[in-house]
Amino acid sequence: MISRRRWTTGGLAALAAVFIAGGAAGESAETPALQLEGKIPLGDVRGRIDHMAIDLARQRLFVAALGHDGLAVVDLKAQRLDRIIGGLREPQGVGYDGATDMVYVANGGDGSVRLFKGDDLSPGGRIELGSDADNVRVDSKAGRIFVGHGDGALAIVDANMHKTIASVALKAHPESFQLDDKTDRIFVNVPNAGSIDVVDRTSAKTIASWSTATRSANFAMALDQIRQRVLVAFRHPAELGVFSAVDGGLISSIRTCGDIDDVFVDSRRDRVYVSCGEGFLDVLAAEGTSYRSLGRVATAVSARTSLFVPELDRLLLAVPARGTTTAAISVFRPQP
């Protein structure tokens, strides 16, 4: 279990302060860049686990239990599974909008986006997108929710009216996509089209398309806002491509673990975390125009979905059930 000294402190500010203080100086050179603190069991959740989102104010983690047709709600402060919301259809993407206190769950099985009210997680509505509703991104300031779905579309949902107000046409199904905080651009992985598309969220139009050339299966993505880099994780070959956010030029690439599903930037440490179904977490450090390996942490086979939460200074990894081992959320603390 996770140390209660770190996880039961009252209030988010106190919790975050303890978390950040945890990475004390003076660690030995052999200390891994990510240290496992503990695991939070997910009860009887079976099958594949997909993406996650967090409600920081309540310290709750939302986990899309795709193979279980449910949404697992984890109480991070109490270090326990709070509940499982059932009756979903292959939930894939999850987003939480703090401005409207609403949880959005995208379902691949029926193409719907189910809404749940943040206070009691009661049903808050339903949006029909047609098919294969997948990744969810939230722009609380603009009052917009973005959902990738179907054979090639990005739905733009009004967070107050809870309805689709625009749709961006793409050449194939979108996987991970990221909202550029500094501009109106959205960078979208479109693996079946062999491209990374750039969308203008104001006009809801694709304004550029970058070829992935000989690389394929570009599912995960992150933005290095400081360097204006788009980090795209490929499965074939297993590597991280570093692209210029200005013109899409490939700047460099670095080999990674296999079956990548998530990648995150730790701006505080100038690092990148990569989670792979092969059973590893790769840690990379920014160096010049590229990144170098800081080490590899063994996890578990099929544990490929993760979420880095800067406010808590923690990387949360979803580990699916295997054999007699129950599903869990592994909590890693960056070092130092």
Image (cartoon, rainbow, N blue to C red):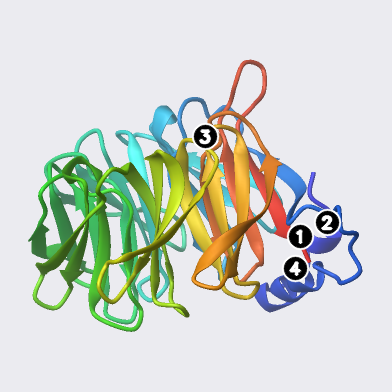
Instruction: Work out whether mark 2 precedes mark 3 in sequence or the reverse, and give the earlier one.
Output: 2
**In this figure, which residue is indicated by the disc labeled 1?**
7
Tell me the SS state at disc 3. loop
**In this figure, which residue is indicated by the disc labeled 4?**
19
Q: Are marks 1 and 2 in contact (CB under 8 Å)?
A: yes
What amino acid type is highlighted by mark number 4?
Phe
> Which numbered disc, 4 or 2, marks the residue closer to the eye?
4
> Which numbered disc, 1 or 4, marks the residue closer to the eye?
4
Badge 2: residue crowd in 10 Å (few <14, some 14–19, many ≥20): few
Badge 4: residue crowd in 10 Å (few <14, some 14–19, many ≥20): some
Out of 261 and 107, give the one closest to the viewer.
261
What amino acid type is highlighted by mark number 3?
Gly
Instruction: Work out whether mark 1 precedes mark 4 in sequence or the reverse, and give the earlier one.
Output: 1
Q: Residue 67: x, y in percent?
A: 41, 28
Tell me the SS state at disc 4. helix
**In this figure, which residue is indicated by the disc labeled 2?**
4
Tell me the SS state at disc 2. helix
Q: CA distance from mark 3 to mark 4?
A: 27 Å
Q: Residue 30: x, y in percent?
A: 86, 52
Out of 279 and 123, give the one closest to the viewer.
279
What amino acid type is highlighted by mark number 2?
Arg
Tell me the SS state at disc 1. helix
Q: CA distance from mark 1 to mark 4?
A: 8 Å
Instruction: Judge left or right: residue 186 versus residue 1.
Output: left
Q: Residue 245: x, y in percent?
A: 32, 73
Badge 1: residue crowd in 10 Å (few <14, some 14–19, many ≥20): some
Disc marking residue 277? 3
Q: CA distance from mark 4 to mark 2?
A: 12 Å
Q: Are marks 4 and 2 in contact (CB under 8 Å)?
A: no
Badge 3: residue crowd in 10 Å (few <14, some 14–19, many ≥20): many
Please say if 79 is above or below 245: above
Q: CA distance from mark 2 to mark 3?
A: 29 Å
